Image (cartoon, helix red, strand yellow):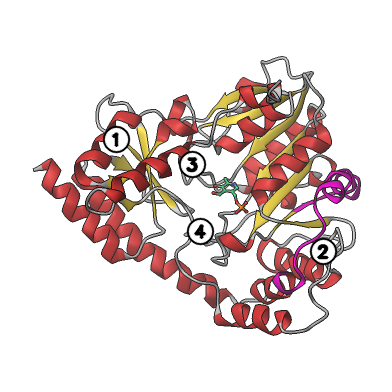
Amino acid sequence: MTPVMANRISRVSEYYFSTKLKQIEEMNRSGTAVINLGIGSPDLPPSENVIGKLVESSMKHDNHGYQSYRGIGSLRQAFAAWYRKYYRVDLDPLHEILPLMGSKEGIFYISMAFLNEGDKVLVPDPGYPTYKAVTELVGAEVITYDLRAEKKWCPELDRLEKLDLAQVKIMWVNYPHMPTGAKATRALFQELVDFGKRHDMLVCNDNPYSFILNDDPLSLLDAKGSKETALELNSLSKSHNMAGWRIGMVTGNRAFIDHINTVTSNIQSGMFLPVQHAAIEALDHPRSWYNQLNRVYSGRRKRVWQLLDLLHCTYEKEQAGLFIWARIPGETDSFAFSDEILERARVFITPGGIFGKNGVNYIRVSLCSPEEIILESIKRIKQIVQ
Ligand SMILES: Cc1ncc(COP(=O)(O)O)c(C=O)c1O
Protein backbone atom coordinates (compact mmCIF):
# COMPACT_ATOMS: atom_id res chain seq x y z
CA MET A 1 0.00 0.00 0.00
CA THR A 2 1.27 3.52 -0.79
CA PRO A 3 1.90 5.62 2.32
CA VAL A 4 -0.87 8.18 2.67
CA MET A 5 -0.17 11.82 3.51
CA ALA A 6 -1.21 13.17 6.91
CA ASN A 7 -4.65 14.75 7.14
CA ARG A 8 -3.13 18.04 8.17
CA ILE A 9 -1.57 18.47 4.73
CA SER A 10 -4.98 18.65 3.14
CA ARG A 11 -5.79 21.70 5.27
CA VAL A 12 -3.14 23.82 3.54
CA SER A 13 -2.00 24.30 -0.02
CA GLU A 14 1.41 24.96 -1.55
CA TYR A 15 2.67 28.48 -0.81
CA TYR A 16 1.45 30.86 -3.56
CA PHE A 17 4.97 32.02 -4.46
CA SER A 18 6.22 28.47 -4.74
CA THR A 19 3.73 27.77 -7.55
CA LYS A 20 4.00 31.23 -9.13
CA LEU A 21 7.79 31.00 -9.37
CA LYS A 22 7.43 27.75 -11.32
CA GLN A 23 5.21 29.58 -13.84
CA ILE A 24 7.71 32.46 -14.06
CA GLU A 25 10.58 30.01 -14.67
CA GLU A 26 8.52 28.43 -17.41
CA MET A 27 7.94 31.86 -19.01
CA ASN A 28 11.66 32.68 -18.74
CA ARG A 29 12.47 29.64 -20.85
CA SER A 30 10.42 31.03 -23.72
CA GLY A 31 11.16 34.71 -24.23
CA THR A 32 12.15 37.90 -22.42
CA ALA A 33 12.92 37.31 -18.74
CA VAL A 34 10.10 38.26 -16.40
CA ILE A 35 10.83 41.10 -13.95
CA ASN A 36 9.82 39.93 -10.52
CA LEU A 37 8.53 42.76 -8.33
CA GLY A 38 6.81 40.25 -6.09
CA ILE A 39 9.04 38.89 -3.39
CA GLY A 40 10.53 40.79 -0.43
CA SER A 41 14.00 39.29 -0.32
CA PRO A 42 16.51 42.17 -0.05
CA ASP A 43 18.79 42.27 -3.10
CA LEU A 44 21.45 44.30 -1.28
CA PRO A 45 24.21 42.54 0.70
CA PRO A 46 24.87 42.70 4.43
CA SER A 47 27.72 44.99 5.50
CA GLU A 48 31.31 43.96 4.69
CA ASN A 49 32.03 43.67 8.42
CA VAL A 50 29.28 41.08 8.79
CA ILE A 51 30.57 39.01 5.88
CA GLY A 52 34.14 39.41 7.21
CA LYS A 53 33.06 38.11 10.61
CA LEU A 54 31.43 35.06 9.02
CA VAL A 55 34.60 34.28 7.06
CA GLU A 56 36.90 34.87 10.05
CA SER A 57 34.83 32.70 12.36
CA SER A 58 34.40 29.94 9.75
CA MET A 59 38.20 29.69 9.43
CA LYS A 60 38.53 28.54 13.05
CA HIS A 61 38.70 24.80 13.13
CA ASP A 62 36.62 24.38 16.27
CA ASN A 63 33.64 26.55 15.20
CA HIS A 64 31.80 23.86 13.27
CA GLY A 65 30.05 21.77 15.88
CA TYR A 66 26.48 21.71 17.17
CA GLN A 67 25.56 24.79 19.09
CA SER A 68 23.58 25.62 22.20
CA TYR A 69 19.80 25.30 21.76
CA ARG A 70 19.40 28.83 23.10
CA GLY A 71 22.14 30.49 21.05
CA ILE A 72 25.43 31.74 22.48
CA GLY A 73 25.18 34.20 25.39
CA SER A 74 26.84 37.02 23.45
CA LEU A 75 24.20 36.80 20.69
CA ARG A 76 21.39 37.04 23.23
CA GLN A 77 23.19 40.01 24.81
CA ALA A 78 23.52 41.65 21.40
CA PHE A 79 19.77 41.25 20.80
CA ALA A 80 19.11 42.75 24.26
CA ALA A 81 21.39 45.74 23.53
CA TRP A 82 19.64 46.25 20.16
CA TYR A 83 16.23 46.25 21.84
CA ARG A 84 17.45 48.71 24.49
CA LYS A 85 19.01 51.07 21.94
CA TYR A 86 16.30 51.16 19.29
CA TYR A 87 13.07 50.06 21.01
CA ARG A 88 13.88 51.32 24.53
CA VAL A 89 12.91 47.90 25.92
CA ASP A 90 14.86 46.04 28.61
CA LEU A 91 15.10 42.29 28.12
CA ASP A 92 16.84 39.68 30.24
CA PRO A 93 19.28 38.07 27.77
CA LEU A 94 19.42 34.88 29.78
CA HIS A 95 15.72 34.10 29.94
CA GLU A 96 13.71 36.40 27.71
CA ILE A 97 15.38 35.95 24.32
CA LEU A 98 15.52 32.87 22.12
CA PRO A 99 17.43 33.12 18.83
CA LEU A 100 15.67 31.42 15.92
CA MET A 101 16.38 30.74 12.27
CA GLY A 102 14.11 33.54 11.07
CA SER A 103 10.78 34.71 12.35
CA LYS A 104 8.84 32.47 9.96
CA GLU A 105 9.77 29.35 11.88
CA GLY A 106 8.97 31.22 15.11
CA ILE A 107 5.33 31.31 14.02
CA PHE A 108 5.37 27.52 13.89
CA TYR A 109 7.22 27.04 17.19
CA ILE A 110 4.90 29.42 19.06
CA SER A 111 1.89 27.60 17.63
CA MET A 112 3.33 24.22 18.61
CA ALA A 113 4.06 25.47 22.12
CA PHE A 114 0.69 27.06 22.86
CA LEU A 115 -2.06 25.58 20.71
CA ASN A 116 -4.13 22.46 21.26
CA GLU A 117 -6.45 21.09 18.59
CA GLY A 118 -9.64 23.14 18.57
CA ASP A 119 -8.10 26.25 20.12
CA LYS A 120 -8.86 29.45 18.25
CA VAL A 121 -6.43 31.96 16.80
CA LEU A 122 -7.06 35.52 15.64
CA VAL A 123 -5.39 36.14 12.30
CA PRO A 124 -5.35 39.45 10.38
CA ASP A 125 -6.96 39.80 6.93
CA PRO A 126 -5.05 40.97 4.99
CA GLY A 127 -2.03 39.33 6.56
CA TYR A 128 1.04 37.14 6.11
CA PRO A 129 -0.35 33.77 4.93
CA THR A 130 1.84 31.75 7.31
CA TYR A 131 -0.26 32.64 10.40
CA LYS A 132 -3.29 30.92 8.90
CA ALA A 133 -1.40 27.98 7.38
CA VAL A 134 0.48 27.14 10.57
CA THR A 135 -2.65 27.46 12.70
CA GLU A 136 -4.36 24.96 10.41
CA LEU A 137 -1.35 22.63 10.35
CA VAL A 138 -1.44 22.31 14.14
CA GLY A 139 -5.19 21.63 14.10
CA ALA A 140 -6.34 24.92 15.63
CA GLU A 141 -9.11 27.10 14.24
CA VAL A 142 -8.51 30.38 12.42
CA ILE A 143 -10.73 33.36 13.17
CA THR A 144 -9.80 36.12 10.76
CA TYR A 145 -10.22 39.70 11.85
CA ASP A 146 -10.69 42.45 9.31
CA LEU A 147 -8.20 45.20 8.74
CA ARG A 148 -9.67 48.04 6.71
CA ALA A 149 -8.19 50.99 4.87
CA GLU A 150 -10.60 53.39 6.58
CA LYS A 151 -9.20 52.28 9.97
CA LYS A 152 -5.63 52.61 8.72
CA TRP A 153 -5.36 48.79 8.68
CA CYS A 154 -5.39 48.61 12.48
CA PRO A 155 -7.44 46.04 14.44
CA GLU A 156 -10.84 47.24 15.61
CA LEU A 157 -10.75 45.89 19.13
CA ASP A 158 -14.22 47.15 20.00
CA ARG A 159 -15.61 44.86 17.26
CA LEU A 160 -13.52 41.93 18.46
CA GLU A 161 -14.79 42.39 22.03
CA LYS A 162 -18.27 41.47 20.76
CA LEU A 163 -17.11 37.98 19.69
CA ASP A 164 -16.94 34.95 21.94
CA LEU A 165 -13.22 34.97 22.68
CA ALA A 166 -13.22 32.28 25.36
CA GLN A 167 -11.27 29.75 23.30
CA VAL A 168 -8.91 32.21 21.63
CA LYS A 169 -5.35 31.43 22.65
CA ILE A 170 -3.30 33.60 20.28
CA MET A 171 -3.81 36.85 18.40
CA TRP A 172 -1.31 37.51 15.60
CA VAL A 173 -0.43 41.11 14.90
CA ASN A 174 2.29 42.40 12.64
CA TYR A 175 3.29 46.07 12.80
CA PRO A 176 4.68 47.58 10.68
CA HIS A 177 2.14 45.57 8.78
CA MET A 178 2.81 43.44 5.75
CA PRO A 179 1.30 43.82 3.14
CA THR A 180 -0.27 47.24 3.84
CA GLY A 181 2.77 49.05 5.27
CA ALA A 182 0.60 50.39 8.12
CA LYS A 183 2.39 51.41 11.30
CA ALA A 184 1.25 50.90 14.87
CA THR A 185 1.25 53.62 17.50
CA ARG A 186 2.30 53.22 21.12
CA ALA A 187 -1.37 53.68 22.03
CA LEU A 188 -2.41 50.77 19.77
CA PHE A 189 0.24 48.50 21.28
CA GLN A 190 -0.98 49.40 24.78
CA GLU A 191 -4.57 48.62 23.77
CA LEU A 192 -3.45 45.27 22.36
CA VAL A 193 -1.64 44.32 25.55
CA ASP A 194 -4.65 45.33 27.67
CA PHE A 195 -6.91 43.34 25.33
CA GLY A 196 -4.66 40.26 25.59
CA LYS A 197 -4.65 40.44 29.38
CA ARG A 198 -8.43 40.89 29.56
CA HIS A 199 -8.98 37.76 27.49
CA ASP A 200 -6.08 35.58 28.69
CA MET A 201 -4.60 35.30 25.23
CA LEU A 202 -1.11 35.64 23.85
CA VAL A 203 -0.69 38.66 21.61
CA CYS A 204 2.21 37.95 19.24
CA ASN A 205 3.71 40.77 17.23
CA ASP A 206 5.70 39.72 14.19
CA ASN A 207 8.10 42.64 13.80
CA PRO A 208 10.60 42.15 10.94
CA TYR A 209 9.93 45.46 9.16
CA SER A 210 10.39 48.12 11.83
CA PHE A 211 13.67 49.50 10.46
CA ILE A 212 12.57 49.85 6.84
CA LEU A 213 11.24 53.27 5.79
CA ASN A 214 10.30 53.93 9.39
CA ASP A 215 11.97 56.51 11.63
CA ASP A 216 10.60 55.26 14.92
CA PRO A 217 10.87 51.48 15.43
CA LEU A 218 8.33 50.31 18.02
CA SER A 219 8.06 47.09 19.99
CA LEU A 220 4.93 45.58 21.49
CA LEU A 221 7.07 44.81 24.53
CA ASP A 222 7.34 48.53 25.25
CA ALA A 223 3.68 48.57 26.36
CA LYS A 224 2.92 48.41 30.09
CA GLY A 225 2.21 44.87 31.28
CA SER A 226 3.39 43.35 27.98
CA LYS A 227 5.42 40.61 29.61
CA GLU A 228 2.23 39.09 31.03
CA THR A 229 0.66 38.52 27.65
CA ALA A 230 2.92 39.38 24.71
CA LEU A 231 5.52 37.74 22.53
CA GLU A 232 7.47 39.41 19.75
CA LEU A 233 9.28 37.92 16.79
CA ASN A 234 12.08 39.84 15.16
CA SER A 235 14.56 39.16 12.39
CA LEU A 236 17.68 40.35 10.62
CA SER A 237 16.29 39.29 7.23
CA LYS A 238 15.08 42.72 6.17
CA SER A 239 16.84 45.14 8.54
CA HIS A 240 20.33 43.80 7.77
CA ASN A 241 19.86 42.26 4.29
CA MET A 242 20.35 38.79 5.73
CA ALA A 243 17.21 36.96 4.59
CA GLY A 244 19.13 33.91 3.39
CA TRP A 245 21.16 33.66 6.58
CA ARG A 246 18.09 32.77 8.64
CA ILE A 247 18.57 34.79 11.82
CA GLY A 248 15.69 35.83 13.99
CA MET A 249 14.52 35.71 17.57
CA VAL A 250 11.51 35.53 19.82
CA THR A 251 11.23 37.50 23.01
CA GLY A 252 8.80 37.48 25.91
CA ASN A 253 8.60 36.37 29.52
CA ARG A 254 10.74 33.54 30.84
CA ALA A 255 7.95 30.98 31.11
CA PHE A 256 6.77 31.63 27.53
CA ILE A 257 10.32 31.36 26.19
CA ASP A 258 10.86 28.13 28.13
CA HIS A 259 7.74 26.59 26.54
CA ILE A 260 8.95 27.56 23.06
CA ASN A 261 12.42 26.20 23.84
CA THR A 262 10.88 22.86 24.77
CA VAL A 263 9.66 22.65 21.17
CA THR A 264 12.73 24.08 19.41
CA SER A 265 15.25 21.96 21.32
CA ASN A 266 13.49 18.84 20.08
CA ILE A 267 13.54 20.01 16.46
CA GLN A 268 16.73 21.94 15.80
CA SER A 269 20.29 21.76 17.10
CA GLY A 270 21.38 25.36 17.29
CA MET A 271 22.57 27.91 14.75
CA PHE A 272 25.96 27.72 12.95
CA LEU A 273 28.41 29.54 15.25
CA PRO A 274 29.95 31.82 12.56
CA VAL A 275 26.43 32.96 11.65
CA GLN A 276 25.84 33.86 15.29
CA HIS A 277 29.13 35.79 15.38
CA ALA A 278 28.17 37.66 12.21
CA ALA A 279 24.73 38.44 13.65
CA ILE A 280 26.36 40.04 16.70
CA GLU A 281 28.34 42.26 14.35
CA ALA A 282 25.14 43.20 12.45
CA LEU A 283 23.23 44.05 15.62
CA ASP A 284 25.98 46.49 16.54
CA HIS A 285 25.61 48.58 13.38
CA PRO A 286 25.25 52.31 13.96
CA ARG A 287 22.10 54.19 13.05
CA SER A 288 23.82 55.27 9.80
CA TRP A 289 23.50 51.66 8.52
CA TYR A 290 19.71 51.89 8.60
CA ASN A 291 19.80 55.44 7.19
CA GLN A 292 21.81 54.49 4.11
CA LEU A 293 19.56 51.49 3.51
CA ASN A 294 16.48 53.67 3.72
CA ARG A 295 17.93 56.20 1.29
CA VAL A 296 18.11 53.42 -1.30
CA TYR A 297 14.57 52.24 -0.56
CA SER A 298 13.14 55.72 -0.70
CA GLY A 299 14.68 56.27 -4.18
CA ARG A 300 13.11 53.02 -5.36
CA ARG A 301 9.81 53.92 -3.75
CA LYS A 302 9.53 57.03 -5.94
CA ARG A 303 9.94 54.84 -9.03
CA VAL A 304 7.32 52.41 -7.77
CA TRP A 305 4.93 55.32 -7.23
CA GLN A 306 5.48 56.24 -10.92
CA LEU A 307 4.72 52.67 -11.93
CA LEU A 308 1.54 52.66 -9.84
CA ASP A 309 0.44 56.01 -11.29
CA LEU A 310 0.71 54.49 -14.77
CA LEU A 311 -1.62 51.70 -13.66
CA HIS A 312 -4.04 54.26 -12.14
CA CYS A 313 -3.57 52.73 -8.69
CA THR A 314 -3.89 54.76 -5.48
CA TYR A 315 -1.66 54.40 -2.43
CA GLU A 316 -0.61 55.96 0.87
CA LYS A 317 2.81 57.56 0.80
CA GLU A 318 3.54 56.90 4.49
CA GLN A 319 4.06 53.14 4.35
CA ALA A 320 6.79 51.26 6.23
CA GLY A 321 8.48 48.07 5.09
CA LEU A 322 9.74 46.58 1.86
CA PHE A 323 6.58 46.95 -0.24
CA ILE A 324 4.09 49.45 -1.56
CA TRP A 325 0.44 48.46 -1.15
CA ALA A 326 -1.89 50.00 -3.67
CA ARG A 327 -5.61 50.00 -4.54
CA ILE A 328 -6.26 48.95 -8.11
CA PRO A 329 -8.85 50.93 -10.11
CA GLY A 330 -12.51 49.88 -10.08
CA GLU A 331 -13.53 46.48 -8.80
CA THR A 332 -10.99 44.45 -10.79
CA ASP A 333 -9.84 41.29 -9.03
CA SER A 334 -6.18 41.46 -8.05
CA PHE A 335 -5.35 38.01 -9.44
CA ALA A 336 -6.70 38.94 -12.89
CA PHE A 337 -4.93 42.32 -12.72
CA SER A 338 -1.59 40.73 -11.76
CA ASP A 339 -1.89 37.95 -14.36
CA GLU A 340 -2.61 40.45 -17.12
CA ILE A 341 0.51 42.48 -16.29
CA LEU A 342 2.54 39.28 -16.07
CA GLU A 343 1.36 37.97 -19.41
CA ARG A 344 1.38 41.23 -21.38
CA ALA A 345 4.29 43.16 -19.80
CA ARG A 346 6.27 40.26 -18.31
CA VAL A 347 6.35 41.99 -14.95
CA PHE A 348 5.21 40.11 -11.86
CA ILE A 349 3.40 42.03 -9.13
CA THR A 350 1.85 40.27 -6.15
CA PRO A 351 -1.97 40.17 -6.12
CA GLY A 352 -3.30 41.40 -2.78
CA GLY A 353 -5.84 38.57 -2.75
CA ILE A 354 -3.19 36.12 -1.50
CA PHE A 355 -3.26 37.98 1.82
CA GLY A 356 -7.00 37.50 2.34
CA LYS A 357 -10.35 38.75 1.10
CA ASN A 358 -9.64 42.32 2.20
CA GLY A 359 -6.69 42.41 -0.18
CA VAL A 360 -8.64 41.43 -3.23
CA ASN A 361 -8.68 44.91 -4.81
CA TYR A 362 -5.03 45.63 -4.05
CA ILE A 363 -1.59 44.81 -5.34
CA ARG A 364 1.75 44.74 -3.51
CA VAL A 365 4.94 45.92 -5.22
CA SER A 366 8.32 45.01 -3.77
CA LEU A 367 11.15 47.50 -3.30
CA CYS A 368 13.78 44.75 -3.55
CA SER A 369 14.92 45.59 -7.10
CA PRO A 370 17.33 48.31 -8.24
CA GLU A 371 15.89 51.51 -9.72
CA GLU A 372 17.03 50.47 -13.23
CA ILE A 373 14.88 47.36 -13.02
CA ILE A 374 11.87 49.32 -11.78
CA LEU A 375 12.43 51.77 -14.66
CA GLU A 376 12.52 48.86 -17.12
CA SER A 377 9.20 47.64 -15.64
CA ILE A 378 7.76 51.11 -16.16
CA LYS A 379 8.86 50.97 -19.79
CA ARG A 380 7.22 47.59 -20.30
CA ILE A 381 4.02 48.63 -18.57
CA LYS A 382 3.84 51.87 -20.61
CA GLN A 383 3.71 49.72 -23.73
CA ILE A 384 0.63 47.85 -22.55
CA VAL A 385 -1.30 50.79 -21.12
CA GLN A 386 -0.89 53.04 -24.15
C1 LIG B 1 5.16 39.45 8.03
C2 LIG B 1 6.34 38.57 7.85
N1 LIG B 1 6.74 37.81 8.88
C3 LIG B 1 7.81 36.99 8.75
C4 LIG B 1 8.50 36.90 7.58
C5 LIG B 1 9.65 35.94 7.49
O1 LIG B 1 10.80 36.52 7.95
P1 LIG B 1 12.09 35.66 8.30
O2 LIG B 1 12.99 35.77 7.14
O3 LIG B 1 12.63 36.30 9.54
O4 LIG B 1 11.66 34.26 8.57
C6 LIG B 1 8.13 37.65 6.49
C7 LIG B 1 8.87 37.51 5.21
O5 LIG B 1 8.52 37.85 4.16
C8 LIG B 1 7.02 38.53 6.63
O6 LIG B 1 6.60 39.28 5.60
In the rendered structure, which disc, 1 or 3, sits on the residue that comes first in sequence? 3
Q: Is residue 85 above or below residue 367?
A: below
Residue 97 lies, in percent from the top left, at: 81, 57
Between the C-alphas of marks 4 and 3, the distance is: 29 Å
Tell whether position 171 is magenta: no
Q: Quarter of the image holding residue 101?
A: bottom right
Residue at numbered disc 1:
339
Residue 312 makes an appearance in the image: no
Task: Looking at the picture, tell me which residue is in the foreground, 351 or 148.
Answer: 351
Magenta range is 250-275
For ligand 1, tell me if the residue under mark 3 lies within 8 Å.
no
In the rendered structure, which disc, 2 or 4, sits on the residue that comes first in sequence? 2
Q: Amino acid at mark 3?
A: Ser
Between the C-alphas of marks 1 and 2, the distance is: 43 Å
Say left or right for 170 vs 320.
Answer: right
Question: Which mark, by number, is residue 18?
Answer: 3
Task: Looking at the picture, tell me which residue is in the foreground, 75 or 176.
Answer: 75
- Identify the residue shown where x is 18% and y is 51%: 380
Between the C-alphas of marks 1 and 4, the distance is: 31 Å
Q: Quarter of the image holding residue 140?
A: top right
Split into 4 quadrants, where in the image is the C terminus? top left
Tell whether position 259 is magenta: yes
Q: Amino acid at mark 1?
A: Asp
Residue at numbered disc 4:
214
Is label 4 or label 3 in front?
3
Is label 2 or label 4 in front?
2
